[in-house]
Amino acid sequence: MRALIADDEPLLRAELREALALAWPELRIVAEAADGRRALAAVLEHRPEVAFLDVNMPHLDGMAAARQMRERGYAGEIVFVTAYDQHALQAFEARAIDYLVKPLEPARLGDTVTRLKARLAGLPQAAALPAAEAASPWLRVTRGTQTQLLRLEDVACLRAVPGYTQLVTRDGEHLVELPLKALQPRLDPLAFVQVHRAAIVNLHFVARIVRDRPGHCVVELKHGLGQVEASRAGAELLRSL
């Protein structure tokens, strides 16, 4: 896997490079940039699988650079790394997979790397679906002996279970014969958030986040749909949104 690092501070670029070397040794940094324009040019030239972008950069800020990357066909993953937390919503509008606040915590970066690996590993499986089905807002699900169509926006949460993905809706629970990582690329990143390595929740169905004991959080769903276990990083991401 290849990555770009963009930050106007050389020391911060070096810190992120060193942190990634520990968290993701097989990742290769193919380009670095000190401003948004150079970041855009480097992404279009190298097409890395991941772009780590600072928000406040000269000439072209990270948000504008990300938007132009998407407009020019960049389909890789974007992670924002910034000292400010007020741009999270804009980040996910740019289809960013994560939003990291400086100073970076190794555990938080490790969680991001885990999410990136899962997303990148899931891309070939998603592409293996028929094109019409991969782009459709509908999903074929099994409930008992019946097969039916379900709108993705009606799904409150998705859980990985052995051999399947379990979907929870107001109508009940359904099973899909696909792994969670294969379904993730089909989900709207503005609505669905991965709160645990085995669980994704729909923001529209989140009632509250509860810390039921030190270091452990759960997400309570609306309409009595139960709780979903959340990692510390997942709970922090959910709070930021």
Image (cartoon, rainbow, N blue to C red):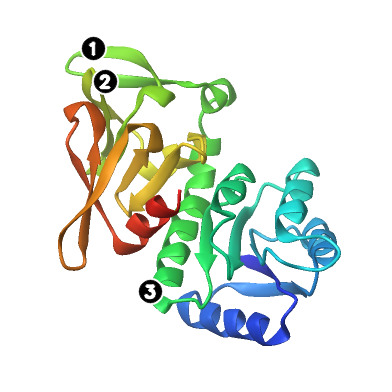
Q: Which residue is mark 3?
A: 107
Secondary structure under badge 3? helix
Q: Which residue is mark 1?
A: 146
Task: Tell me residue 102's x, y (percent).
Answer: 53, 74
User: Is 241 drawn above or below residue 158 in the view shown?
Assistant: below
* In contact (CB < 8 Å): disc 1 and disc 3: no
Task: Tell me residue 54's x, y (percent).
Answer: 67, 67
Q: Whole-Å distance between the Cαs marked 1 and 3? A: 42 Å
User: Is 134 drawn above or below residue 22 in the view shown?
Assistant: above
The residue closer to the viewer here, 125 or 148, is 148
Sequence-earlier tag: 3 or 2: 3
Q: Amino acid at mark 1?
A: Gln
Q: Which residue is mark 2?
A: 142
* In contact (CB < 8 Å): disc 2 and disc 1: yes
Q: Is residue 81 left or right of residue 73?
A: left
Q: Residue at x 65, y 67 (%)?
A: 3
Q: Whole-Å distance between the Cαs marked 3 and 2? A: 37 Å
Alpha-carbon neighbours of circle 1 within 10 Å: few (<14), some, or many (≥20)? few
The residue closer to the viewer here, 132 or 136, is 136
Q: Quadrant of the N terminus?
A: bottom right
Q: Amino acid at mark 2?
A: Thr
Sequence-earlier tag: 1 or 3: 3
Q: Whole-Å distance between the Cαs marked 2 and 1? A: 6 Å
